[in-house]
Amino acid sequence: MLSYLLPILIGVFIIGYSIGKPSWREYQRNKIKNQPFKKEWRKIIQQRMPYFRQMPAELQLQLKQHIQVFLAEKNFIGCNGIQITDEIKITVAAQACLLLLNRKTDFYPKLRTILVYPRAFIKEQQSMHEDGVQHTKKMVLAGESWGFGKVVLSWQDTLDGAKIPNDGRNVVIHEFAHQLDQENGKSNGAPILDKGQNYKCWSEVFALHFEQLKIQAKTGKPSLFDYYGATEPAEFFAVASEVFFEQAQQFHYEYPMLYQQLKQYYQVDPIHW
């Protein structure tokens, strides 16, 4: 009899745990959000994130609450001798959480660790040429998003990106846009859309402007977007996200259809900040 009941009891326990876990996590997150936000942290945001002061009050509050949850759930590790401080954590968290405002979020569920280097870091990439010989290529990177729980950032580039809020260049926004893109698998420029958004429309608009940027990059024609966005759709989504938050007016003027897609996705309109 016991051998018959045991699998049933185990099944009931697993089902109960699966149902109860999200509710418990939400309960814990609400407790964290209701904690007082440290004055020192607010000063860091004001210093390192200039457009914070232009944001509506309700978004400022939401951002601070998101930061508290982000810091409670993510682990920061310093590399190459850098010491992790509140300044580093708040500067990164504030910009990462900017992408989560006004919409249901699970706070980058795959992400566990943010690795921070003092400055741009070198990555070795292996490639196989047509002659069958393997080659090692060294690349200097300001940031990188991994699909299995890590984001890597250069602290100097993070500071530079945050210091000038209207140049369309922000490594934290770029890498965390990749994290959003990677929530449903490999990064491909098609993140999980809200029920109100249409994947067909998203695909058509993004494909049109991606091809346009590829032509601009090939011919050297100036573009609002960094040419790096022309390398693949995933990079175009990340580059477009940078410009959306940092050069909203110009973006909307030059690419209204693309702007509308990102406005619907991010559920904010930086034009009014």
Image: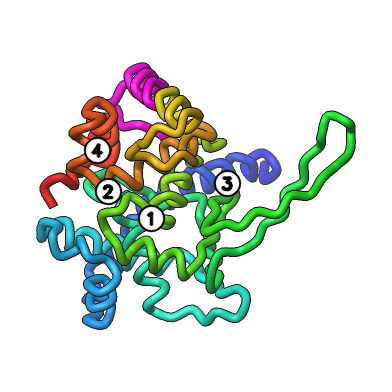
Asked whether 1 or 202 is in front, the reply is 202
Q: Is residue 229 above or below residue 47?
A: above
Mark 3 element type: loop
Whether residue 106 is visible to the viewer of this picture, yes or no, is yes
Query: At label 3, which amino acid type do we have?
Result: Gly
Q: Which residue is mark 4?
A: 251
Query: At label 2, which amino acid type do we have?
Result: Phe
- Closer to the chain start, of discs 4 and 3, is 3
Q: Nearer the viewer, mark 3 or mark 1?
A: 1
Mark 2 element type: helix
Measured as percent of width and height from the top left, residue 239 is found at 40, 42
- Residue at the extreme front: 220
Mark 4 element type: helix
Tag of residue 147: 3
Query: At label 1, which amino acid type do we have?
Result: Asn
Taking the spot 65% from the left edge, 54% from the top edge, the residue there is 139
